[in-house]
């Protein structure tokens, strides 16, 4: 490494800056996610980035890749073992128990968005800090809840201009899974010599994860392996059939995927993922989720059935950009304030502030002196009007209002400028169009 490189501070591997030019994509995803949450009755919840490490060990599961290899964990100054949250569901459930949300009418529907941390192998669309939108419904085991969640996930991706495929499976209840795991181990026993050491380990620790192994030899063997649907109890089977009936009624297409098991331990019954159509291997899942009926109890709460899903921002935005999905109109200024001379500049800064307070999105270039430069800036911003305040206007107590589309200039009294500009912008309905995107986080 060169000396120069050593001295340069740079981005930590796997991290990502979201630059101003990227923000419209992020705003679009956030605002659609929030709008959908509101329209389905999901209330926003935020949880801290740092949680006790045990929370994830007890929820996501000891033998999972996330807990075994991917957590950013450390002992803090108070000697507490803490972890930067690798997923949101566990923290949401902890908050649900800790704040007694259990007493609210069921299902308690919660919406969450924020960054997460996993020491994953960085690749296209995969980072070590990444963002998710999460929707969780707690307190209701009805199959309609599962179907509604899939409807939201599918609808969100469609609204963002993508064509996902819904992959769905049921992994039954604990007893079903225990019987199935035994059958799976039995099936692979005579075929062990065809398995890599990694897969052999998986088979021993977490046999279900063999099903979504990416190794070609294993994928071939898995095709003839027993399928979990044949091991479901009658209740779990009925539940799954009802979920599918709801999806049929909603006309949401889905693929029954007997190999879909998810990488977190808290799931039971319905599990689903949303895949990009050109990536049937699921490497590029936009999101996933399912039922987790035992998690609340496992973390110390009352028995509470629950289900939810999460969509990741980065892969989503990558695919939206590839597909040239049109963004909503940007929130750009409607008017430019141009000044000529020092005294004019002072008045113009005040005028700019008055326009802003009146709800008019204005721009200026107060450090520039020449009118030419300022008009160029106004043109670049594609404003509807420019206000020009020169020596003559100052003496007359007026201001010039230039229509940038046709170049027509009108002189208007200075004290009337704010209401006049407002009236004109409202009339041309520009302001209304431009305020439709919400810049909040
Ligand atoms: P997950 O499948 O681990 O589920 O993550 C959901 C989505 O987050 C993935 O499909 C992917 O789009 C995105 N994602 C995961 N890891 C990364 C990464 N390193 N870089 C970029 N994107 C990533 C969960 O997290 C569950 N908590 C979902 C859930 C909610 N289940 C029930 N409720």
Image (tube, rainbow, N blue to C red):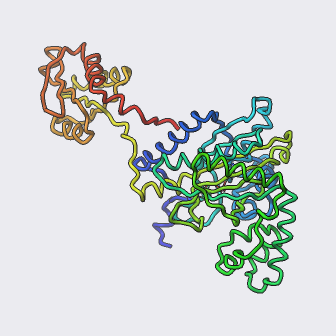
Of residues 131 and 268, which is closer to you in this image?
A: 268
Position of 417 relative to 100 (above/below): above
Q: Hey, which quadrant is residue 333 in on the image? A: top left
Q: Residue at x 27, y 23 (%)?
A: 427
Q: Nearer the viewer, residue 206 or 230?
A: 230
Residue found at x 12% / y 28%: 408
Q: Position of residue 207 (x, y in %)?
A: 79, 69
Q: How many marks?
A: 0
Residue 300 located left or right of residue 208: right
Left or right of 203? Residue 381 is: left
Left or right side of 68 for 313: left
Rendering coords of residue 105 (x, y %): 75, 29
> Where does ligand 1 appear, by image quarter?
bottom right
Above or below, 203 against 27 in this view is below
| Horizontal side, residue 18 vs residue 192: left or right | left
Judging depth in this view, the residue of 235 and 344 nearest the camera is 235
Q: Residue at coordinates 66% horizontally, 36% vertically from top-left?
A: 45
Residue 161 horizontal/vertical position (percent): 45, 50
x, y percent for residue 428: 27, 27
Q: Is residue 341 above or below residue 189?
A: above
Image point 67% across, 52% down: which residue?
244
Q: Quadrant of residue 96?
A: top right
């Amino acid at each position: 490494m060169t000396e120069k490189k050593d001295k340069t501070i740079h981005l930590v591997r796997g991290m990502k800056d979201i630059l101003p030019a990227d923000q419209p994509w992020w705003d679009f995803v956030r605002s659609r996610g929030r709008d959908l949450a509101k329209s389905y009755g999901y209330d926003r919840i935020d949880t801290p980035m740092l949680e006790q490490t045990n929370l994830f060990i007890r929820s996501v599961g000891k033998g999972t890749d996330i807990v075994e290899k991917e957590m950013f964990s450390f002992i803090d100054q108070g000697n507490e073992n803490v972890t930067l949250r690798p997923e949101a569901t566990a923290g949401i459930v902890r908050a649900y128990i800790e704040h007694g949300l259990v007493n609210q009418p069921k299902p308690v529907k919660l919406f969450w968005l924020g960054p997460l941390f996993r020491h994953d192998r960085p690749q296209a669309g995969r980072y070590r800090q990444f963002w998710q939108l999460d929707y969780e419904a707690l307190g209701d085991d009805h199959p309609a809840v599962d179907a509604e969640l899939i409807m939201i996930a599918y609808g969100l991706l469609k609204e963002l201009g993508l064509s996902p495929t819904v992959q769905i499976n049921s992994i039954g209840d604990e007893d079903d899974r225990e019987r199935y795991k035994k059958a799976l181990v039995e099936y692979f026993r005579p075929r062990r010599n065809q398995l890599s050491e990694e897969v052999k380990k998986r088979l021993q620790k977490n046999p279900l994860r063999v099903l979504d192994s990416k190794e070609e030899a294993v994928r071939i063997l898995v095709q003839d392996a027993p399928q979990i649907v044949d091991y479901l109890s009658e209740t779990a089977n009925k539940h799954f059939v009802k979920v599918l009936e709801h999806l049929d009624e909603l006309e949401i297409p889905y693929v029954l995927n007997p190999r879909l098991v998810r990488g977190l331990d808290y799931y039971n019954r319905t599990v689903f993922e949303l895949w990009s159509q050109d990536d049937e291997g699921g490497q590029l899942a936009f999101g996933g989720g399912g039922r987790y009926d035992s998690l609340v109890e496992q973390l110390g709460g009352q028995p509470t059935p629950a289900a939810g899903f999460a969509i990741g921002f980065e892969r989503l935005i990558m695919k939206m950009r590839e597909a040239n999905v049109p963004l909503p109109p940007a929130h750009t200024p409607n008017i430019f304030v141009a000044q000529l001379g020092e005294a004019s500049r002072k008045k113009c800064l005040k005028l700019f502030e008055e326009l802003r307070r009146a709800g008019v999105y204005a721009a200026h270039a107060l450090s520039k002196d020449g009118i030419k430069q300022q008009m160029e800036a106004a043109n670049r911003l594609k404003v509807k009007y420019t206000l020009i305040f020169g020596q003559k206007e100052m003496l007359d107590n007026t201001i010039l209002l230039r229509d940038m589309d046709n170049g027509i200039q009108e002189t208007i009294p200075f004290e009337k400028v704010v209401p006049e500009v407002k009236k004109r912008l409202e009339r041309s309905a520009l302001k209304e169009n431009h305020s439709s995107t919400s810049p909040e986080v």
